[in-house]
Image (cartoon, helix red, strand yellow):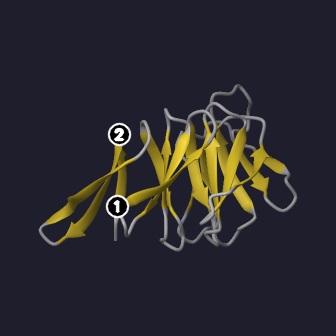
Amino acid sequence: VTLVVGIGLHALIGRPYSDAPFALIGKIPVGRMPHQLSVSPDGKYVAVNNRMASTTSVIDPIAMKEIVRLPVGKQPHGIAWSPDARTLFVGHEHDTYIARFEAGTWKPLKPLMVGVPQHDLTIAPSRPNELWFTLTNTTQGDVLRVYDLETNKITPIKVSDVHDAYFTPDESEVWSSS
């Protein structure tokens, strides 16, 4: 098990061992102010948003190095992988679209035009066509939304004070903090 934590101008890598919870085993330079990360479901990649650089770093966790730095929108925050690990989604706190990239080639795909800034993204393996996201920096209500990746339809969820959104392990509920 590898843990990646954004700190300063580096992502820190630590592995648990018997004498302490984690030990620092290296530093991987990434962009300015790493914030939020996501491990691909197949474990091949770790994506880290560089919040003040408008980029997302993709790390090879075995080689422990950044393999690509992707240009994204303003203040990337939410980050998620499709359940099949083929697509990386990046949300933005100061842009109104969700960026998408093809894993491996890192080719940009057509962005999802959602019309509002986003905070967190989540997608459940049992619902691979539903990208759930929370809103930020907006006066709009119903700040939890679902983007249907098949129909491109956005469904607002009737809830007002939502900050984060995560599926429970059995994927039967979405939990949030406010």
Q: Nearer the viewer, residue 163 or 119?
A: 119
Of all residues, the one furthest to the top in this rendering is 139
Q: What SS does tag 1 mark?
A: strand
* Residue assigned mark 2: 9
Please give left or right for residue 136 compared with residue 35 in the image.
Answer: right
- Picture coordinates of residue 90, whole percent (x, y): 62, 48
What percent of the width, then of the height, locates residue 42? 53, 74
Which quarter of the figure has residue 127? bottom right
Label whose residue precedes the other's in the sequence (1 or 2): 1
Q: Residues within 10 Å of mark 1 (few under 14, many from 20)?
A: some
Would you name the residue on which mark 1 appears? 3
The three-letter code of the residue at mark 2 reads Leu
Q: Visible in this render: residue 164?
A: no
What SS does tag 2 mark?
loop
**Position of 71 relative to 107 (above/below):** above
Picture coordinates of residue 23, whole percent (x, y): 20, 60
